[in-house]
């Protein structure tokens, strides 16, 4: 059986998130024989999208594909520097006028092709996105890759599960992002598609979803808006999922969740 190993990081949040994935990859990419790395980067730059500078940092530390979500528009570089951020994709089902692409195919050294699809949900995410289910159908009509991986950036767990069931047997894996909380429901569905509701977050461990606790508690207790400050110091959380994929079957044969704290 010929296999490849893919590592998928949940949302990267701020400087501690960038430091966490860099440190983890420096320790594990070569040692664990990781062939391909994906990370959701929509909170990379202080919680506001991904700047060109930080895109380059993520690429340098070993991330092959950077996905995004509802904060894609929050950083002007995502629009004006789209041509320089070729390995960042944004949700496919945004308006076609939005710069960038929603799917990209990569070819590994052994010739295996991996397509990464980025979709965004509609439940509790008021944007101008189209139906992600129909968008997936549209993509798959013309896609002929060995491995197909979907980052479904969505709020509602039910919507994520429904998309995975809708896609099963047609894609290799559906992995959710957005909530910043790693779920404990990793499974291989009936037709062989791997599913995880949410890969989690890479950022400040002592935080509320990656933002400073004092402001988050104040806002929650009083209802008064406050700044979402992103911690720059402290312990770091690493959340990811590792997939071993059978190339011939195009299916995940082994998986493990990563949930580590770094000092």
Image (tube, grey):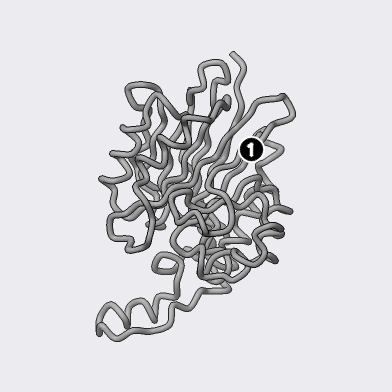
Direction front: furthest residue = 97
Give the x, y percent position of residue 170. Answer: 42, 26
Q: Quadrant of the N terminus?
A: top right
Res. 83 image quadrant: bottom right
Does residue 66 sit above or below 50 in this rendering?
A: above
Q: Where does label 1 land, which residue? A: 36
- Of residues 162 and 196, the one nearer the viewer is 162
Residue at the image point whose x is 41% and y is 42% from the top: 135
Quarter of the image with the C terminus is bottom right
Q: Is residue 198 above or below residue 250?
A: below
How many marks can you see?
Answer: 1
Compared with 104, 202 (above or below) is below
Q: Closest to the observer: 222 or 81?
A: 81
Q: Residue furthest top?
A: 1
Q: Is residue 61 left or right of residue 24?
A: right
The residue positioned 74% from the left and 53% from the top of the image is: 60
Residue 97 locus on image (x, y percent): 52, 58
Residue toward you, 261 or 147 = 147
Q: Is residue 210 above or below residue 258?
A: below
Residue 76 in the image: state x and y as whole percent: 59, 71
> Counting other residues with Cα less than 10 Å from the Cα at mark 1, is it few (<14), some (14-19), or many (20 or more)?
many
- Give x and y (percent) for residue 183: 35, 46
Secondary element at image label 1: strand
Residue sitting nearer the eye, 24 or 68? 68
Q: Residue at x 62, y 37 (%)?
A: 105
């Amino acid at each position: 059986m010929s296999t490849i190993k893919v590592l998928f990081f949940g949302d990267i949040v701020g400087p501690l998130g960038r430091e966490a994935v860099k440190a983890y990859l420096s320790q594990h990419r070569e040692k664990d024989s990781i062939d391909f790395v994906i990370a959701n980067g929509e909170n990379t730059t202080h919680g506001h999208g991904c700047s060109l500078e930080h895109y380059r940092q993520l690429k340098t530390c070993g991330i092959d594909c950077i996905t995004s979500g509802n904060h894609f528009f929050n950083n002007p570089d995502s629009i004006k520097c789209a041509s320089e951020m070729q390995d960042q994709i944004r949700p496919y089902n945004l308006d076609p006028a939005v710069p960038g692409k929603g799917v990209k195919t990569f070819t590994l050294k052994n010739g295996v092709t991996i397509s990464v699809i980025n979709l965004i949900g509609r439940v509790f995410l008021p944007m101008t996105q189209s139906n992600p289910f129909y968008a997936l159908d549209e993509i798959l009509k013309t896609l002929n890759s060995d491995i197909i991986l979907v980052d479904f950036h969505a709020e509602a767990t039910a919507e994520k599960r429904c998309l995975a069931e809708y896609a099963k047997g047609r894609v290799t894996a559906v992995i959710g992002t957005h909530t910043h909380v790693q779920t404990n429901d990793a499974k291989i569905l009936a037709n062989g598609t791997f599913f995880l509701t949410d890969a989690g977050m890479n950022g400040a461990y002592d935080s509320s979803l990656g933002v400073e606790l004092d402001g988050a508690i104040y806002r929650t207790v009083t209802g008064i808006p406050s700044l979402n400050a992103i911690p720059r110091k402290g312990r770091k959380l690493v959340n990811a999922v590792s997939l071993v994929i059978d190339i011939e079957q195009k299916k995940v044969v082994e998986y493990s969740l990563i949930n580590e704290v770094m000092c």
